[in-house]
Amino acid sequence: MDYKDLANLIFPDAKDISYYEEKYVKRNLPEGAVVTRYAPSPTGFLHIGSLFQVLISSMMAKKTGGINYLRIEDTDQKREIEGAITSVINSLKDFGIEFDEGQIDEINGKGDYGPYKQSQRKEIYEAYAKYLLSQGKAYPCFATPEELNELREKQEAAKLRTGYYGVWAKYRNLSVEEAVEKIKNGESYVIRLKSPGNEEKKIRHKDVIKGNVEFPENDQDIVIIKGDGLPTYHFAHAVDDHLMQTTLVVRGEEWLSSIPTHLQLFNILGFKAPKYAHIPTIMKMDGESKRKLSKRKDPEAAVDYYTEEGIPKESVLEYLLNIANSNFEIWRKQNPDKKLSEFDFQINKIGVSGALFDMVKMLDVSKNVISRMSAEEVYDKVNEWAKQFDEELSVMLQNKEYALKVFGIERGNTKPRKDISKWSEVKESISYMFNDKFDKNAQFEYAKISDKNEIEKIVKLYIEKYFDINDDKQTWFDKIKDLAEELGYAREVKLFKSEPEKWPGHVGDISTVIRVTLTGRQNTPDLYEIIHVLGKDTVIERLS
């Protein structure tokens, strides 16, 4: 008996690999086009680090006229969470990530290189495992959990590397006849790669982001087909990336140490390996030190957090591009109206060390993003968010015409308002613009002018002599100056600063009195615009 007999015994129905090599034809893409993928395991929510990874893949595919596809790696079915595939797909859609091909729901995919769910590709992996077995490059291993545990304990006691390699690979050199006998006796087994590596030798590899790296060769006889008949991640990803013709793999730096194993697999299978880009881990400050953003400790680790908080998807993506390419921030300032896809993203400009996540910076980016939106855009997005997360706000926005006026204050000009960073802030931010939410009996915190009699005098004179809803902005402001001067205040701020002892205050202090009386707040967007949105009757009622 020979290796082919053993391969036929283990995989009697597996096709020859030539069938799949012919089935998955060469992609018709322009020269230099990148084929990349996002390949999550359905084991939980979408992590912000995963969104970072997917954004980079997507930018590279679009930039080169290539393909970005979604593959579901569900071979570890013990860890799979029900509904996780749908959750991941929907979360990515929420962030505007659309794939050119790949999985579209729990069962179905689109594209000519599927199935895109690894559990549906079992026969393909069997074909390539059979191919390796028939060449003596893989073998059935009958080691029991007890044997493997005993092996590890001996290695640890001798202070040796743990693992299944070299002289420790008990079933590596079993004869074909012995292996066949064990299989026919019903003994359990896995299929292992017969590694040709030598741990004392080095491999050199050029990572797209990390640059030149050096590792010992892999000499571990890794499992390629598990006892349940499904492949391990290592084997499945090599077969899939080959057949789906992946040219660039973007993944977390925690996978960098797997490079020797993965390159060895591609080499033994006779495949051309893709390029690898290992992105830095997203970190956060914890006191004086940095640590990895944690699923358990940090709510912002889950992308659903941003949806629930109402941080626009555009803000999150712009912030992640800030992390990825430091020149993005300057580009955005110079090109405020351009789409993200127009940015000349450079994958080799991604930093080598851990990317520091800063929520304050993200919200600052978000303020800028929202400031560029039209009143209509803001209304639509806030209304959509409120329907799901804030019923009270949703009711407030039912009068669309009025709400658009509110959101239109200080919007669309050269210096738009930047007081909103997320939709969950909107209700508190605009509540004073709605009479049923405005508490006229509240104790307002005035600024420099806080004497009740002085406030009443200012407001009364403003209503009686200076208030006219039909005034244009310049006329309105000139009247505020006149009001200040009549009451003995400096009509110009610079005049007050030149001789502060001469005046009790200036025109800004007078306008603050009117602002606080109308809104209950010392800081608001443009007061003139607020007055016009509130309307004559409301203004007089509140001032009175």
Image: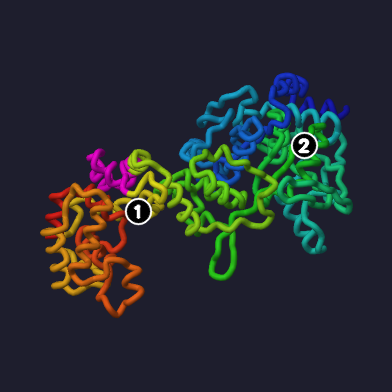
Residue 106 is situated, as x and y percent measured from the top left of the image, at 51, 31
Could you say where residue 67 lies in the image, as x and y percent from the top left? 63, 30
Above or below, comparing residue 371 to residue 16 in the picture: below
Locate residue 171: give its quadrant.
top right
SS assignment at label 1: helix
Q: Residues within 10 Å of mark 2 (few under 14, many from 20)?
A: many
The quarter holding residue 79 reads top right
Decide if residue 418 is in sight here.
yes
Please tell me which residue lies in front, 9 or 441.
Answer: 441
Residue 392 on the magenta span: yes
Q: Nearer the viewer, residue 150 or 481?
A: 481
Q: Residue at x 77, y 52 (%)?
A: 163
Residue 346 appears left or right of 194: left
Give the labeled residue for mark 2. Answer: 273
Q: Amino acid type of disc 1?
A: Glu
195 lies left or right of 38: right
Q: Is residue 286 left or right of residue 214?
A: left
Most common secondary structure along the magenta stretch: helix
Residue closer to the observer: 191 or 122: 122
Q: Which residue is label 1 attached to?
A: 425
Which amino acid is tagged 2? Ala
Where is residue 244 shown, x and y percent of the image? 68, 29
Q: Residue 128 or 60: which is nearer the viewer?
A: 60
Quadrant where the image shows the C terminus: bottom left
Please state the extent of the stretch shown in magenta in the rendering. Answer: 383-409
